[in-house]
Image (tube, helix red, strand yellow):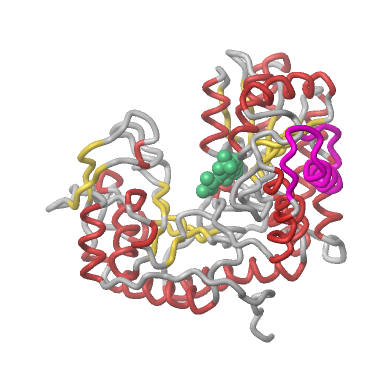
Amino acid sequence: MKTIIEPFRIKMTEPIKMTTRDERVRLLDEAKHNVFLLKSESVMIDLLTDSGTGAMSSEQWSAMMRGDESYAGSPSWLRFEASVKNITGFKHIFPTHQGRAAEHILARALVKPGVLIPNNSHFDTTRANMEVAGAEARNLLTDEGMDLALNHPFKGNMDIARLEATIKEVGVERIPFAMITVTNNAGGGQPVSLENIKATKALLKKYNIPLIMDACRFAENAYFIQQREAGQKHRSLMDIAREMFSYADGCTMSAKKDGMVNIGGFLCCNNDDWAEQFRSLLILTEGFPTYGGLAGRDLEAIAVGLNEALDDDYQAYRNATVRYMAQKLDAMGVPIVKPAGGHAVFVDAAKFLPHLSPADLPGIGLVNALYIEGGIRSVELGSLMFGKGDAPAPHELVRLAFPRRVYTQSHFDYVVEVMQEVYAKRHEIGAHRIEKQAKFLRHFTAELSPAKSITAKAVA
Ligand code: F0G
């Protein structure tokens, strides 16, 4: 098979500032050993997130030029609404400034203290929005999804039996809606099968519980269904996406992912009573219903971007980039979450650095080594991000997220070379300690320092 090439040409460039290892040692020291505190110009390859970091197409930029900034009833809104309706089929569409604003409105309207919101895995902002409104946010991922190294086609699937057990345990009246996240970011960008979405809906229908889809990466999920699920190969991504949405009663969306834009989101539903409540809250917190939290030109870019995300050639290329890096790392012996996800490669830092304990923040050790050796910025999803006090997180992961249409194959080859160097020197990577931390979401602003010694590991 020939190389899967980037299905686009580049007509605008952005310089990458080259730095030396010595400069990066100093820059990281100035940033208190926390890559969130680096200036982005100090980073050569930025894999911190795939959210809002993509490149827009010439069609999107053209559409932006005709953005109509009327407060009410703009043609840009009508094009946005038509595009979202065409793909999702939902009756009511509300534009928001990003995904978490949609989650906030959903939670504020429908969540009351004491309720429970099931999900395959809540993303952190989803969990926070549900919890602030008084809900218990419960993850019901299948056992396969919990096993980092297991190769399984749909590790994002909801555990249907546990969902039913949860409904019986807490009672229908305490579950205003359930959610399903496609793909499952928190679990490694793993997809949910069409069969699983259908089965989730069928079970919820029996109990009259509505289903809300967290649709941020709906197009990547549709691609995995097309490629991996029996009987789906012949279908278009649009057709599969429409079927996915058909099982949901509404959705929250961060267009910063599969909307292929730098900012934006939406909230959708079919229920007229919900729509009434969402509309009032939208006006209160985001803006008039025909622009929400967005400019007319943003609405135009999303209207086009959602369709570009469903292009077969784009998804084949996108998936190939993630798979390419995953295969190279795997061949080198780097422990990664398998199979590769839709938007990122996740490295198991606990296995990568077996001499470090969770208290030594192995994920931070790896993140910082990748920055010093190669100017690469990744993100820790381990005990700094998810640990509570001294209690460690369940996993010590490092995410290399892929911005959409931004980096080429040589950039990824470079990342692989840097990883190889870091892997060869992994025994030299030491512990980090927290010097200063905020009460909530400490990973964003924590000040860290390299420790002189590591925590003694209990020998099993
Ligand atoms: N849901 C999922 C599954 C997400 O991955 C995100 C964002 C959101 C909701 C919230 O959307 O950022 O537009 O408010 N994920 C980003 C990330 C931040 O890096 O994975 P938002």
The residue sitting at 44% across, 61% down in the picture is 46
Q: Does the magenta stretch include residue 79?
A: yes
Q: In which quarter of the image is ligand 1?
A: top right
The residue sitting at 23% across, 67% down in the picture is 23
Image-quadrant location for residue 283? top right
The residue sitting at 40% across, 39% down in the picture is 386
For this orientation, the residue located farthest to the bottom is: 2
Horizontal side, residue 403 vs residue 378: left or right: right
- Residue range (magenta): 67-93
Image coordinates for residue 177, horizontal then vertical, percent: 71, 25
Task: Answer yes or no: is residue 186 visible.
Answer: no
Task: Answer yes or no: is residue 167 visible.
Answer: yes
Q: Nearer the viewer, residue 284 or 188?
A: 284
Image coordinates for residue 36, horizontal then vertical, percent: 36, 49
Q: In this view, does 171 lie above or below 292?
A: above
Image coordinates for residue 102, horizontal then vertical, percent: 65, 33
Image-quadrant location for residue 225? bottom right
Horizontal side, residue 135 vs residue 330: left or right: right
The residue sitting at 22% across, 53% down in the picture is 30
